[in-house]
Amino acid sequence: MEWEVVIGLEIHAQLATKSKIFSGASTAYGAEANTQACAVDLGLPGVLPVFNEEALRMAVKFGLAIDAEIGLKSVFDRKNYFYPDSPKGYQTTQLHHPIVGMGHIDIELDDGETRRINVTRAHLEEDAGKSVHEGFSGMSGIDLNRAGTPLIEIVSEPELRTAKEAAAYFKKMHSIVTYLGVCDGDLSQGSMRCDCNVSLRPKGQEEFGTRTEIKNVNSFRNVERAINAEIERQMDILEDGGVILQETRLYDADKNETRAMRSKEVENDYRYFPCPDLLPVIIDQDYVDAVKETLPELPDAKKARFENDHGLSATDAAVLAANRDLADFFETAAKIAGDYKLTANWVQGDVSAALNRLEVGINELNITAEQLGRILQLIKDNTLNNGGAKEVFNALVEGKGDDVDGLVDSLGLKQVSDTGAIEEIVAQVLVDNPKLVEGYLATPEEKRGKAMGPFIGLTRKAAKGVNPQVVMEVLKKKLEEL
Amino acid sequence: MHNKTIAEISRDLAAGEYSSTEITTDLLARVKDLDKGLNSFITVTEEQALAQAKAADERRAAGNATPWTGVPMAHKDIFCTKGVLTTCGSKMLSNFEAPYDATVVENFNNAGAVSLGKTNMDEFAMGSSNETSYFGPVKNPWDTDRVPGGSSGGSAAAVAARLVPGATATDTGGSIRQPAALCGITGLKPTYGRVSRWGMIAFASSLDQAGTMTRTVEDSAMMMNVMASFDKKDSTCVERDVPDYTSTLNDSIEGMTIGLPTEYFRDDISAEMQQQVRNAIAEYEKMGAKVKEISLPNTHLSVPTYYVVAPAECSANLSRMDGVRFGYRCEDPKDIEDLYCRSRGEGFGNEVKRRIMVGAYALSAGFYDAYYKKAQQVRRLIKNDFVEAFKDVDVIMSPTSPTPAFKFGEKTDDPVAMYLEDIFTIATNLAGLPGMSVPCGQVNNLPVGLQLIGNYFDEARILNAGHKFQQATDWHLKAPQGIE
């Protein structure tokens, strides 16, 4: 039978606020366990939550970025369940009245097509703490530093059809929230996590099949792999005439398979009800409009501008627009260089290679957009050749200096294009290497092209920065004159 | 000295009649002597009280005393107090020392008040007789075979027995007014949002409100001057100026309209009880007040509504008592499930468990609409009854409780009979209005309370009305036998 895959994602993104959603404790990552949990985060008797308005502003900003309805009245609810890292015995979240309603984003597929994916909603909630199972023989440790960190949970419509689409959707969301600065997007620290709902149905059937939910997948690659593994598992069962159990599963990346979690955790009745300690959050259109004013240019708009205004290919534009820091770096450099295509090639070539090699982000690289722009400017006016430019680039990346023009001078990379000057250098090389000249003259006519190599090398060694094109011409002429 | 009111002590301290250390020492000795029989305190903080008294005397000597500097009082054991046990009357928190002060406690500390300790209460404020306390029942100073009412029974008994001139208390469905009535003292529950709930252990968050237990209305006004404050730490606290509640106590009440809800003067309330309240109303008429019969048609729905809303909220509020981070933990838990089940099973008493179960049921999938949602809708109707009534009247008056103090064990096997103890007080909480009980007579030598319900944030008016009554009568001066 032919099956259709139905996928919906729930993405949790930590909001980049300084303090927690309902307390004044810091949200900074990596502190010693339980040092960033105040009485409110510990859920001590008698404490009360106070809503952090910065989290509201960020959530509204996100809603506007995905062209969603903004909830002018949103309400916090309590979701009741017992778990050691949930200190109050309930999570404060938004069930019926989320801050962000129906919206949408466009994802690019491999064939260059774009697909619109609808976003059902996004709501504000608090993160839980962490259970630590190592180092407490027979017991578990609880770290509540993360408890109360603000999250938005972004729920997609079940409109994704392949694991690749799901990964593209996750990537696009990552790009949007980091563009907005509402989430740092650090997947390795759990700043963004993804739950994947997967089901299969016979092609053409309207009704959804039974779905499973893969919890807490935390990389683009694993989203794709986990979903594919789950699709395969479900298809095997269905093909054998079996039934899918609605359950929560975990993805094991080492074995590339999904595993059922304890079924007990699935059967919870969360007994939601409005939190009586928090007032409904009421905002007006003026507030929304004011937040709208602060929206930056978003990836889609930037990509379109790169294509239309600067003649980049769709692929180049997409890659450069996907990351806001990289896009800013690119644009600053391109403006100085006066050549968007050349800059695009460099950013995707040498710059990307350096980032990968050093495993750093663009802002940690030892070269600024201004410096790259200057290097490219020097290529454009023939002061540097490509090799020289790479040499300056590498020197900067390795921290061997920070003045581009100074490095060009000190490394002797200034390109000599003046034919007279090059003729003098070549003449000297020929005088200094009589044996080579003898050898050359003894070489049969048809092999002389190759035999010219050593002279080129020697000329360039004698004068760094000589224009190789000019060297070739002069050499040819001089050798023929012999 | 123990018969002095807060106002008198405040004046005496200012006049140098005696020092805070002297009266504190005197009252501590009295607590030691009398409270063995009453059990109104869970914790007596003698050392701390004497230190506070000494500091208060020094502050007065330095010339920056407030009316409260050096005045002794006590806190209901529901308010978190830094470094002192805060048990909420439960085994669950029998070892819990809060690392911070409740805003109410902080306000009294800042004013220089001296706290003698923490008063007994029904477990997690759930009860109307103080019989659910893990630390044993409180006895009514008027008759030690009888209950003091609840849940703030410890505060009420301590004030009635002249152990302290005033104590803080909380009221979720009548927990200040009913014990005040049963112990013959004055109890005020302010408007919801008037006093900060920060540091007050939550029972039902949308109903809980801190208030006062004193012998006189004047003292209640003095307590309110300190307690009421806007607090950013409580999102439900209302930002609104705090008036000087003592400044309007003596205003004339001529022309004031008193509403008497027909639903609160029911046939099943004894004629003697009703007569005491009618006598009080007649007193008001003598002072020039007008009386008007009114109707609060949804009154009969208030107890059932309350017993959905309050348990639902408490079922979530008490989830944090899980044995993981603080409080009671069972011995040798097998696993996390066992730790939860036994810590909570052993740590909570029956009434608390009953309400958690009722609340969890009312919130569960498939029942939410029929119970919790419906209760919220009815709650709005009850509130509207009052809003309508206050278009025509200034104060609503009624009996505070259907009976005077009853005997221990009389209602413990019949939760519904116990719940009906709060039949006249519960609607006020559902509506969020201020309410007060003042002593207005006796039946069989047991005190009877008159309830005064005011409009939103109209505490000053009911304090004014209550004070005028106490100027004209002496019910508030009567003391239990053997206490004088």
Image (cartoon, coloured by chain):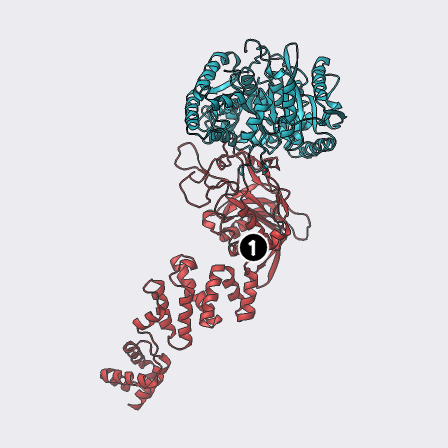
Q: Residue at x 72, y 23 (%)?
A: B288
Neighbours of disc 1 within 10 Å: few (<14), some (14-19), many (20+) = many
x%, y% of residue A110? 55, 61
The hue of chain A in the figure is red
Which quadrant is the C terminus of chain A positioned in? bottom left
Residue placed under numbered mark 1 in the picture = A169
In the rendered view, does B477 fall on the left or right side of B377?
Answer: left
In the image, residue B188 sits, relative to residue A225, either above or below, namely above
In the image, residue A93 sits, relative to residue B286, either above or below, namely below
x%, y% of residue A456? 31, 79
Q: Chain of mark 1?
A: A
In the rendered view, does A328 fall on the left or right side of A65?
Answer: left
In the image, residue A447 sits, relative to residue B40, either above or below, namely below
Between residues B186 and B128, which one lies in front from this camera angle? B186
For the question of whether residue A127 can be seen, the reply is yes
Q: Residue at x 59, y 63 (%)?
A: A113
**SS type, badge 1:** helix
x%, y% of residue A138? 42, 31
x%, y% of residue A58? 55, 50
Point out the residue furthest to the bottom here: A481
Q: Mark 1: which amino acid?
A: Tyr
In the image, residue B404 sits, relative to residue A260, either above or below, namely above
Chain that the image shows in cyan:
B
